[in-house]
Image (tube, helix red, strand yellow):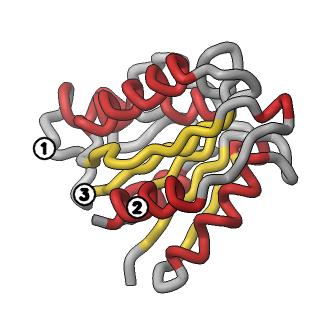
Amino acid sequence: MKKVLIINGSPREDGVCSQLINQVKPYFIDCEIRQYDTYKMSPAPCNDCKYCEYHNGCSNKDLDVFFEDFEQADYIIFFSPVYNNFFPAPLKAIIDRFQRYYSARFKRGAKPPIEKHKRVGLLVASGSNARQCADYMASTLKQAFTVLNGEVCSRYYIPDTDSNKYTFNVVELEKFIHFLKK
């Protein structure tokens, strides 16, 4: 059975990202789904302690279970609002903690640092029209996953959520799913 890892970067339990998660899950009914809410996780930031340059893992143990699921996932789907033109702080902290894999690859020679290949999707919701920010967020993930044995192959962007004039486009959502599962 394939595994899906859902990473929710929003603090709102009833916000647009949560609504999107509920729309996406039925497309993966044949998969095992694990969901992590970054605000509930409260991840410690990377402090460049150098532990991962010499050891597998991280000196902070708060994300050990998350990273086990991360490594085993076939699909990883990020759901994120735009905060100050980028990912919210808890989600950014998790991305920074990918350092453990960069150190495994470039300091300890693990090629690849994660054995299982991943297909990655990004869904971004923004209060205004911040497409350039969503593009930058996608570029950041694309660069990260070149080392993490994955590819960002699908994205879906919803602007203007603050105005309540946004819509969920089923055709775009199904294209997102199609490219992710392809």
For label 1, the crowd category at 10 Å Cα-Cα, with few meaning under 14, some 14 to 19 and many 20 or more, is: few
Amino acid type at mark 2: Tyr
Residue at horizontal 67 percent and vertical 53 percent from the top: 168
On screen, residue 47 versus residue 118, left or right, reads: right
Disc 3, SS: loop
Q: Counting residues from the N terminus, which is met first, the one under dot 2 or under dot 3?
A: 2
Q: Nearer the viewer, mark 3 or mark 1?
A: 3
Q: Counting residues from the N terminus, which is met first, the one under dot 3 or under dot 1?
A: 1
Amino acid type at mark 3: His
Disc 1, SS: loop
On screen, residue 120 versus residue 125, left or right, reads: left
On screen, residue 179 versus residue 116, left or right, reads: right
Residue at horizontal 47 percent and vertical 80 percent from the top: 31
Q: Nearer the viewer, mark 2 or mark 1?
A: 2
Spatial distance from mark 2 to mark 3, Cα to Cα?
A: 9 Å
Residue at horizontal 55 percent and vertical 72 percent from the top: 33
Which dot marks residue 75? 2
Res 110 → quadrant: top left
Q: Quadrant of the N terminus?
A: bottom left
Which dot marks residue 140? none
Residue at numbered disc 1: 111
